[in-house]
Image (tube, rainbow, N blue to C red):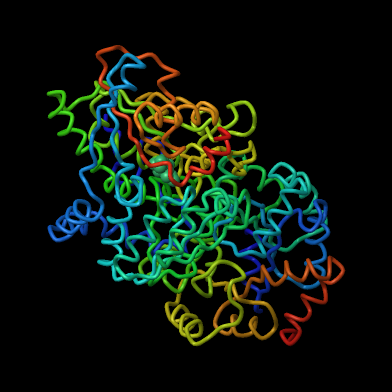
Amino acid sequence: MSYNVNEKGYYGDFGGAYIPEMLYPNIEELRNNYLKITSEASFKEEFAHLLKDYVGRPSPLYFADRLSKKYNTKIYLKREDLNHTGAHKVNNTIGQILLAKRLGKNRIIAETGAGQHGVATATVCALMGIECVVYMGEVDIARQAPNVARMKMLGAKVVPALSGSRTLKDATNEAMRDWINNPVDTHYIVGSVVGPHPFPDMVARFQAVVSDEIKWQLQEKEGTEKPDYLIACVGGGSNAAGTYYHYLDDESVKIIAVEAAGKGIDTGESAATSVLGKEGIIHGSKTLMMQTKDGQITEPYSISAGLDYPGVGPMHANLYRTGRAEFISITDDEAMTAGLELSQLEGIIPAIETSHALAVFDHKKFNPNDIIVVNLSGRGDKDLQNYIDYFKL
Amino acid sequence: MNRINQKLQEDKKLLSIYFTAGYPELEDTVEIIEKLESSGVDMIEIGLPFSDPLADGPTIQDSSTQALKNGMSTEKLFEQLKSIRESVSIPLIIMGYFNPILQYGVEAFCIKCQETGIDGLIIPDLPVDVYHDTYKTIFDSYGLINVFLITPQTSKDRIHFIDSVSEGFIYMVSSASTTGAKSGFGDEQTQYFDRIAEMNLKNPQIVGFGISNNHTFQQATRHSKGAIIGSAFIKHLSNYGKGGISEFVESVIRSETT
Ligand SMILES: Cc1ncc(COP(=O)(O)O)c(C=O)c1O
């Protein structure tokens, strides 16, 4: 059994492309070209070169000694926070901008929640000299102000999404509407493994560099390519998809996916899609999503803008349904505490999204000999104000 | 014969109106349908509101949000329409996004449509390929016509495929846009209308998006069988209420009465 996408764009029951006809030509163009273009030698060379010299890859696999001692196990942190722009998101935007250029597009749009994907998109657009428009929920614009400023500095136009909950879901709607209105010259750089096929697979492939590196880095450090556990937080699921990618079909490597419980699963203010969601269609993909019994998409809540999304990518929906991955939900409070703990034990301030993954160590006991790799998906600079307010520092 | 096919045989240009069920007030649905019919509208698209209408611009988004706030739901809509066939005889089409229908159960939804006297469906985010492979037999067994969209960007081959799967009419989206984004037609649209007319499709075409008055109605129906008005009607409802329905319809079709 493979946990990867099939030729029709499905992961088990999930995936596909449930899109209005207006988007069909755009999606069809991508579907027909993404594998061809990304397997060309010139593409691979340019992608590898930019990841190395511009992004700063490979990112270190760091053995977190004090954290490991505290939890009496072996914890490695995959330092995506050290990438240029401060998160894993840039792996994908580099890949997609190179693809967009080869498709002859001269305008880029993107959605963003935490602003990390928006910054990563604005960055590659500046690098390539291409016009960039980023949609961002009005609520997120307020809670991630430093990233809004960075996008502007990079020359992007930031457009507030004013509909619905005014967060990531609504920013995604607005980006899709923009694409419908600008079908020919524009490429939509989707920021996670969500949306219609081929986006989930394409983004997962660009993020797969993460597990590619983990394999040889772990071999160097532990004499084995295989960890016992992989842990990542899941908003849409891109840093998780990158972490799992080369281990998906090797069931001796256990997978843990961490969702945001918000104020608690039962409080009505949560973003734990696997627990609270049902199969449905969101942003062109059949997947698990939070909705009313009538099929209206509900408004999620999380302290972290990057996890505040009512769906998960179809790969993760399938990992949940098949039991391949263990899903754990972490509350705002647990995440914030874990973020402070990492800061003071290891001198690394993580993004609040990432703090959710780190909080797993208070939830689950591991053996002293277990080798665990956590994707440290982003750095906490953008969240400093939130941490300071929360801890009254 | 399905009411839609019957209507398409009439020797006139058809006016179809879209409105969002449950807007402006929850219980307005039946009254709006009756008034549209008595004003001379040929066909009605009843919008089942959705929280995240991807293909719609602000006017229809806002009406959907308001309708949901008012308490509109799939169950509620069928309840309101229970006796609609006692008073209304023109074709009625439900237009809605796929997720609410999926949650209701596709077959259960089709059964309800048949019981209610709904003639067809327009589901913008149910692609023709998925419909053809998975749902067509269900729709067919309850006598429902599913209507597909084409746009100026739709390839010739795909238009022929859509034509072969369609059994009523083809919804010709006038420009690559969300609803209500553009008004009026330029050269690009005229060329597109001409191009489609020359394809001699088996299904008649009805043009939607960008039609708001008699002038655009005339332009849109020069080569096609009819036209659909959505956002402009919703705006009129917002500004003048249900009282203004017949005025609106008359202003669109006035010089059409031959
Ligand atoms: C640092 C960081 N981690 C994780 C996420 C969640 O996204 P994904 O699940 O696609 O990795 C985000 C999203 O903005 C982020 O900025």
Look at the picture and state if A275 lies above or below A172.
above
- Residue at (63%, 38%) from the top-left corner? A292
Residue B172 on image: x %, y %: 53, 71
Residue B159 vs residue B121: left or right? Answer: left
Look at the image and tell me in which quarter the N terminus of chain B lies.
bottom right
Look at the picture and state if B64 lies above or below A127.
above
Residue A195 on image: x %, y %: 43, 50
The quadrant holding residue A314 is top left
Nearer to the camera, B206 or B202: B206
The quadrant holding residue B87 is bottom right
Q: How many marks?
A: 0
Name the outermost residue toward the right.
Answer: B243
State whether residue A313 appears in this view: no
Q: Where ligand 1 lies, by quadrant?
A: top left
Nearer to the camera, A377 or B159: A377
Residue A97 on image: x %, y %: 30, 61
Residue B174 vs residue B20: left or right? Answer: left
The quadrant holding residue A74 is top left
Residue A215 vs residue A232: left or right? Answer: left
Residue A257 on image: x %, y %: 40, 29
State whether residue B255 appears in this view: yes
Look at the picture and state if A91 lies above or below A2.
below
- Residue at (60%, 85%) from the top-left corner? B219
Nearer to the camera, A180 or A92: A92
Look at the image and tell me in which quarter the C terminus of chain B lies.
bottom right
- Residue at (33%, 55%) from the top-left corner? A93
Residue A110 vs residue B106: left or right? Answer: left
